Each structure stands twice: as C-alpha cells, then as structure tokens.
Amino acid sequence: MTARLSLFDSPLFLGFDDFEKTIDRMRKSGAEGYPPYNIEQIAEHGLRITLAVAGFDMDCLDVEIDQNQLTISGKQIDDESRTYIHRGIASRQFRRSFVIADGIEVSGADLDNGLLHINLERIIPESQAVKIEINTPAKKKQMLKTIDVDSSSEN
C-alpha cells in the first residue's frame, strides 16, 4: 500500500484538512462536458459564470450553493404529445458544480436567450488583526495575586 502525498501535508498548513476533499470534488466535476460554460471577470471584484442552457426554461433549472459548492442543475421533461421524425437535440439533465472560495457570494442569476448567467462578487472583509499579549512568569504571578486579592475581598 502506498501513501498518498498531499499538498497540505506540511505542518505549516494548520486547519486546511478540508481542502483536499474540495480538490477531489473539483477533479471529479472538471470531467463534465455538458453544458458548456464561460467564466468571466465583469468588475474588479465581480465574476460571472455563463452556462449554455438552450431549451431549458426557469422551471427546469436550479441554482444552489451549499458549503462553498455552487451547483447548477437542469432537467427537461419530454413532451409526450410530440412525435419526432428525427431527434438531434437531446433533452437531457445535467449537474455542474463549482467550488466557491470563502468571501465569494452569489449576487444573482438571470436567464436570457438560452444563457444562464450567475453573478458572483468577492466581498473584501475588513482587517480583523488582533494583537496577542505575551505573558512572562512575573506577569502571570502578578495576575494570580490580583485574582487572590479580589476573591478574598468578596468573602
């Protein structure tokens, strides 16, 4: 049995355990070929995913985001009242997934002329840097004395 090397095996990567699972999901979804799609930058912090979904109406499409995974699915229902002499346009279902980074939000979706546009926006958080005080043994001893004095004065 061979050990699988991981990009995140380094002890310097703390808390990145789920990234490997995310990369595996990306590999699996990358093999899908239908429907074709584009990803474009539409603003400094804006992205747009456009899928070619000709033949699908809004009732047949679903856009959902769950745990940083954007999933677009479509299901066409065959019209039993039609009789085809030749059927070159398949009515098939699809499911296409994209892994979305933290800080990226879906701002909307539009269906226009057989193209489904999903707009994404990168939200730039304000810095939340916190200064951590470093204690010395003398400081700790002083803190303990203060706690003892406070607790004995309550009695």
Image (cartoon, rainbow, N blue to C red):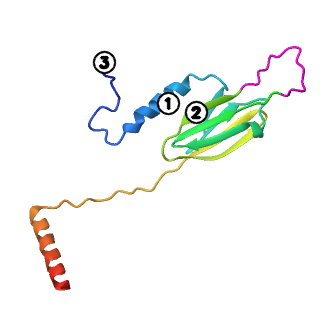
| Residue 150 at x, y percent in the picture | 18, 80
Q: Which residue is drawn at 17% across and 75% down?
A: 147
Q: Is residue 81 magenta?
A: yes
Of callouts 1 and 3, the N-terminal one: 3
Dominant secondary structure, magenta: loop
Q: Which residue is drawn at 15% across and 82% down?
A: 152
Q: Which amino acid does label 1 sit on?
A: Arg
Q: Which residue is drawn at 60% across and 37% down?
A: 71
**Where is residue 136, by image quadrant?**
bottom left
**Where is residue 154, by image quadrant?**
bottom left
| Residue 76 at x, y percent in the picture | 76, 30
Magenta residues, start to end = 79-92
Q: Residue at x 71, y 37 (%)?
A: 61
* Location of mark 3 (residue): 2
Residue 10 at least partly seen: yes
Query: Dot 2 surroundings within 10 Å: few (below 14), some, or many (20 or more)?
Result: some
Dots 2, 1 in contact, CB < 8 A: yes
* Location of mark 1 (residue): 25
Label 3 – label 2 distance at C-alpha: 30 Å
User: In screen coordinates, is 127 left or right of 58?
Assistant: left
Q: Does the magenta stretch include residue 30?
A: no
Q: Which amino acid does label 2 sit on?
A: Ser
User: In screen coordinates, is 68 left or right of 37?
Assistant: left
Q: Which amino acid does label 3 sit on?
A: Thr
* Location of mark 2 (residue): 97
Query: Dot 1 surroundings within 10 Å: few (below 14), some, or many (20 or more)?
Result: some
Residue 43 at least partly seen: no
